[in-house]
Every structure is written in C-alpha cells, then in structure tokens.
Image (spheres, rainbow, N blue to C red):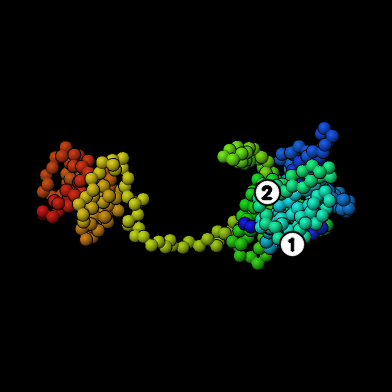
Amino acid sequence: MNMRTVRQSAAFPTVAILRKGGPKVVKDGKEAFGADLNDRFRVDWLPGMDASTKELFLGIYHTDQPHSLRAMIAFPSVWQAWSTTNEAYWGSTRFAWADNEHYLSLYNPFTWEALIVRGEPFKPFIPGEMLKFPDRQGQPKTFKLKPTTRFDLFLPELVACFVTFQVKTKSSGDLVNLRRNLAAIQAAADALGQRTGAAGIPIVVSRREDTVQWHKAPGQTVAVKKWLIDIRPDPASKWALTFAERLGALALAMPLAVEEDPAQDEDLLEDGEEDDGRQSAPPGQASAATAVPSSGAARGKAQGAANGAAADALAPKGPKDWTTFWKVAVPGLGVSQEQAQKAAKDRDALEAYRALRQAM
C-alpha cells in the first residue's frame, strides 16, 4: 500500500488527538515526552472545541485515558480517512514535509526562509536523509524526517456532534500494523461487493503488546516489546455476524480445476520407512511399492488399470488380507500358512501374483 501524502480524505471537524504517551514533562530544564501509557490512549483535546462534546465523551467513557474506543468507518474507503507523510519539526512547528518521492514544503526552521513551496523547486526525498541548518548562534543543527501517520475516527456514540477523533503516531511499528489492519478491513468490505464499501463497519481501536524488530545498527537487529495501535472490526457487532453469513453464502462449492493428472500426484502414493531401499522397476513395469494402494477398493482399481482390464475380483479387499489371499484366493496354489505369511510380507507380492496370473 502506497503512502498517502496530500490528504485525499474526508473528515468532520477534529476535536481531539489520540496519543500514546502522557503529557510532556520538564527534565533538567528541557521539555521531554511523557511516559508511554502502554495499553491506554490519552485524549488530547484541541483548543476551541465545544465543551459539550467533551462532556458527552466523558459521560460515555468516564475517562480521558480509555483502553479502547468504539468507532466506525464513515466512508467507502478506509484510505479516505488515512494519511502518512514524512515530517520534521522544530519545537511544535513543522518546517519540512515530504512524501516518498519528493519534498512538498521546506523552510529554514530558524529564519523561516521558504526553500520549497508546494513541491517547487523539486527536491527528491531520500529516506534517512539528515537536514542541516545553522542555528541563530551559527552552530549546525541536524534534523531527520520521520513518518507521521494520521487516521480519523468517527465515533457513532457522538453522532449528534459529527466530529472526528484523530489517531496520530510517529512509530514505524504502528505504521506497518495500522496499514495491515486497514487493508484487511477494506478487503473484507470489497469481498461483500457493497457499493457502500467500508462505510458503516464498526471497529474497535485499542493497543496491544507485540514484538517488533528494531534495526539497532547495520547488521544488528534486536527484538523489542512495543504497545502498538490496533484496529479491528467489532466482533460483537451485527456487521461481524452478517459478514460471516454472507461470506458463507458467497463461498460456493466449486470443483477444483487442475492441469496435472490426479493419478500422478506423488502425495497420494504410499510413503513407507523403507523408501530409500526400494529398487526402481524396469521401464514399462510398475513397482510394487507404488502400485499397491492403501485401501482395498483403491488397490483393486490400481490392479485393473495395470492389467488394462476391470478390477480383479481376486485381489485382496483390505490391507490385512494378503495372507488369506495367498493361501485361499488363488486356486491350485496350495501354499501353507507359513508360506502365505512370508508371501504377504514380500514387497514384490503383487508382481508375483501378476506373473502367476499370466502363467495360468
């Protein structure tokens, strides 16, 4: 799935940002990010929003740090509410913005000189590239663009407000996981073939702990536990039950069309422990190990196909009938019980029987 840059999205007014960490704190005189809330979100209310919306939200969830939110896909495509860009900030101000191909805007973060506006002049974006600018004291400062993912949520319980809660994350693990989640939801909607697409699908937005591979250094990968954002259809919703029922109705029983001859499928042949000791049969003559099916009915069909005739009525009807076969079923053979048991263990028993039938 390609990363969206210019937001091809539709959204109601955004009233809050869902973040994964606590409020910023001051450490050693510097502002730092708050600790990760692990299995919770923090609802960061935007200034100027209607106070009644916040009151209604708190009346439903009873906290501004919920474990999960009940939301809904409000548009035919989940990607209409999705956006991912590469961004760099100085303080709270974004001064660099790029997609996977080129820069969309770029300013000097200290002088605010416009270097790129609306993609002009063209400057290719190189992942991992470091931007360097001298600060006001002339000291060089370096910046790196990081992917920033946004996904707009419509909360049906706040339908009277018609507002959006926006999930925002700069984690590459979240980016990969959310992209997979949303692609699966969109694929499920497309499978039903509805014109409304993903619109109306109830979802649950939560966080789950998972292991991600962190490329610590070239050639060095470390497994790290992270609490990722997770989006899934609500399993308790009516949509989930309807989805399962419709898929069952759509999955018609169709015959499997193959180009190979099923009789030549090696997976269907007997595979014993003595396969390595088998000797290959002469050309035009089937070996006993591959010619003896496991069931009596299949063995009879294989015998008939080998002789170019119908199934032999004298062939054993079960896997344990070889002793009786050599002792009774072949007229005039007159073998003893001991000879019959020995013949039953002979891997070339079927070939011996064929030679006997040709001599009779």
Side (left or right) of 342 relative to 142:
left
Q: Which mark is residue 120?
A: 1
Task: Assign a secondary structure to mark 2.
Answer: loop
Q: Residue furthest front?
A: 138
Mark 2 neighbour density, 10 Å: few (under 14) some (14–19) many (20 or more): few
Please, what is the three-letter code of the amino acid marked with disc 1? Answer: Glu
Q: Which mark is residue 306?
A: none
Q: Position of residue 345 (x, y in %)?
A: 22, 41
Nearest the viewer among 110 and 58 is 110
Q: Does residue 33 appear in this view?
A: yes
Side (left or right) of 336 relative to 46:
left
Residue 321, by quadrant, is: top left
The N terminus lies in quadrant? bottom right
Task: Assign a secondary structure to mark 1.
Answer: loop
Q: Position of residue 264 (x, y in %)?
A: 32, 56
Nearest the viewer among 330 and 307 is 307
Residue under circle 2? 129
Nearest the viewer among 229 and 212 is 212
Residue at left offset 76%, top offset 55%? 106
Q: Does residue 66 appear in this view?
A: no
Q: Are marks 2 and 1 in contact (CB under 8 Å)?
A: no
Residue at left offset 62%, top offset 52%? 180
Q: Residue furthest bottom?
A: 195
Who comes first in sequence, dot 2 or dot 1? 1
Nearest the viewer among 174 and 345 is 174
Please, what is the three-letter code of the amino acid marked with disc 2? Answer: Glu
Q: Position of residue 273 (x, y in %)?
A: 31, 40
Mark 1 neighbour density, 10 Å: few (under 14) some (14–19) many (20 or more): few
Q: Position of residue 169 (x, y in %)?
A: 72, 47
